[in-house]
Each structure stands twice: as structure tokens, then as C-alpha cells.
Image (spheres, rainbow, N blue to C red):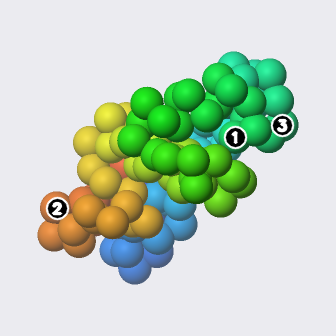
Amino acid sequence: MTCFPSAIERAGGRYSSDWHWAALAPIHENLHVDDFIRFKSCAPWETSAGQTAMRNAGYNARDFNQAGFEKWVRVRSHQEYQDTFGVRAPEDPDYRVADDNKPLTCLFAQ
């Protein structure tokens, strides 16, 4: 897919709108797929390896369910997004408009 800077300009300068969400979604879903493969289950929170990984990440037994695992994937998604783009995702609790509401220039063809 090729995107152009003019498209983001037509979005009214709201850089954290569609472009940021479009960038975050595949990161999040790729982490899910990776977990399903790594833990050999469509319910990784039910496997001992998945529970161990969650425990090592600071979660406890009450988080060993679908909602807890989703919360863990969101945290990892935010970190991967920041590592990739150098700004925080709009959904990240530490997102700050002044610092993070910037265009994701690497998404656009020049």
C-alpha cells in the first residue's frame, strides 16, 4: 500500500487519527498470532507456557484469562509501536498530544 503526505494533510492535521490506528492494528494482531504460534494454542492464557510468560511480565493468576491476556498484548503493542515509530500510540495511557501527535512519516511514499 502506498500512502501520500497529502492524504494526512486532508485529515485536518489530526495525525493521531486514522493513520496511527492503522499502524497500531497490525502490530497488535501480529502479537496475537505470534502468541498463538509460540504457545501452540488459540487460548494461550490456558497453557502453562502462556501463564509463565504472563507471570514473568508481572501478571498474576487472576489475569490468566482472555481479558488479562488481551491487556498484556495491548501493553506489548504499545511498546512495539513506540519502538517502531518513536512516538506513543493514541491508546497508550502515557500518550501525550504535544509529544506524540506527529505524522508517521515512514508510512508515506516520497
- SS at badge 3: loop
Q: Which of 10 and 34 is in front in this view?
A: 34
Q: Residue furthest bottom?
A: 12
Numbered disc total: 3
Q: Quadrant of residue 90?
A: bottom left
Q: Which mark is residue 10?
A: none
- The residue sitting at 46% across, 46% down in the picture is 59
* 3D distance between C-alphas at marks 2 and 1: 35 Å
Q: What residue type is labelled 3?
A: Cys
As drawn, is 38 to the left or to the right of 42?
left
Measuring from the top left, give residue 34's x and y in whole percent.
67, 27
Vertical arrangement, residue 29 with respect to residue 18, above or below: above
Q: Quadrant of residue 62?
A: bottom right
> Which sits earlier in the primary sequence, circle 2 or circle 1?
1
Q: Nearer the viewer, mark 2 or mark 3?
A: 3
Can see residue 44? yes
Q: Which of marks 2 and 1 is in front?
A: 1
- The residue sitting at 69% across, 40% down in the picture is 45
Measuring from the top left, give residue 85's x and y in whole percent.
34, 41
Can see residue 106? no
Q: Nearer the viewer, mark 3 or mark 1?
A: 1
**Residue wearing tag 1:** 45
Q: Which residue lies furthest to the left in this view?
A: 98
**Residue wearing tag 2:** 99
How crowded is the residue under tag 3: few (<14 C-alpha within 10 Å), some, or many (20+)? few
Q: Residue 42 carries which label?
A: 3
How crowded is the residue under tag 2: few (<14 C-alpha within 10 Å), some, or many (20+)? few
Q: In which quarter of the image is residue 46?
A: top right
As drawn, is 51 to the left or to the right of 10?
right
